[in-house]
Image (tube, rainbow, N blue to C red):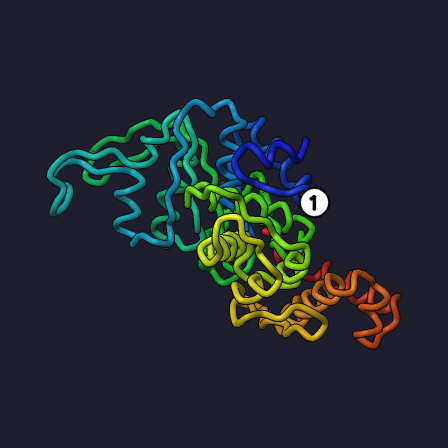
Amino acid sequence: MSSQFSLFNGGIVGESPLIDALLTEIGTAARCDLTVLIFGESGTGKELVARAIHDQSARAMNPFVSVNCGTLTETLLESELFGYERGAFTGANEKRKGLFEAAHKGTIFLDEIGEMSGASQVKLLRVLQEGTIRPVGARSETHVDARVITATNRNLALELQAGRFREDLFYRIAVLAINTPPLRKRVSDIPLLVDHFLGEAEKRSKCSRKRTVEKEAIPVLSNYPWPGNVRQLRHVVEKLVATTMDGDLITAEAARRALPNGHLAGPRAQVPLLYHENDSLEAFLDRTLLTLYEQLLATTGNHSQAARLLRIDRTSLYQRLERARRRINEQSLP
């Protein structure tokens, strides 16, 4: 699938091998009607992936309904998803359809599925098994035909082990699994993303003349580790637009000032703490090594030079990096 799809349909911008692979997975998911679990770090565009699947599917002409499960209490989540009858609880002055009914014949996207309580998980499992919902206060069930796509930034394999997520529900939602890559693993896409977000921000600001980005500003942005991923990059570009005038040149210094703590790019750049919830010490050290190497490689452009700065021979560095990648991939698999 051409990466041009990403530039003009759905906002998934990039030409890197990771994005090409992601677009292929989106196409595969769109051609069937199975449940999909999208996993990845916060800010990597999981909802964009869900929308792209819907937009390319046979359900594209029907509703796409999104709900963030992490922002609702258990009681609110049930009434939002399944609706309620008049008089079902205090304040229920009229009957209301839930989001599953709103998504009938279309797609419902359940973001942050890992935040669901055990009781809510049971009710969702019943919907997936039976294709029916029971609104709060209702005596009968209602048939719904909505494709379910879910997403999480949690490691559900660890949630299963800890007993916080139901195994039967996991296998129901993860028939297809798609990983959204972090921005630090597709640094080559940053120039495209900057140009894309710059155009969006200027359009919203009704700028009369387009800003241009100084060539030296790109390495500054590329060397930053982007813990908030693509979402954070968008906010930084919006800040650059807000702090410069129409037609201005966005310089490397302006880019540094827009980054948290005036981040300084280069071999001496500080490696951020990359601890994730439930990380083992080994996983933390693996992630730190990979991030340090990526920063050095982006700065030097040369694996041998990066190895010299780390005071290790090239072969040993390759081997350590490969072991670290393998362990992290094994831990992140759903």
Q: Is residue 169 left or right of residue 15?
A: left
Q: Position of residue 306 (x, y in %)?
A: 80, 68
Judge whether 182 appears above or below 205 on screen. Answer: below
Q: Is residue 321 visible?
A: yes
Between 234 and 149, the one nearer to me in the picture: 234
Q: Residue at x 58, y 51 (%)?
A: 334
Between 248 and 198, the one nearer to me in the picture: 248
Is the residue marked by circle 1 packed among few (<14), some (14-19), or many (20+) residues within 10 Å?
some
Q: Position of residue 279 (x, y in %)?
A: 58, 68
Between 131 and 261, the one nearer to me in the picture: 261
Describe the element under mark 1 as helix, strand or loop.
Answer: loop
Q: Which residue is mark 1?
A: 16
Q: Is residue 273 left or right of residue 76?
A: right
Q: Residue at x 68, y 32 (%)?
A: 2
Q: How many marks?
A: 1
Judge whether 195 appears above or below 158 on screen. Answer: above
Between 179 and 252, the one nearer to me in the picture: 252
Judge whether 180 appears above or below 58 on screen. Answer: below
Amino acid under disc 1: Ser
Q: Quadrant of residue 265?
A: bottom right
Q: Residue at x 24, y 31 (%)?
A: 140
Q: Position of residue 135 (x, y in %)?
A: 25, 37
- Quadrant containing the N terminus is top right
Q: Position of residue 143 (x, y in %)?
A: 33, 27
Q: Residue at x 39, y 31 (%)?
A: 131
Judge whether 246 appears above or below 302 on screen. Answer: above
Q: Is residue 153 visible?
A: no
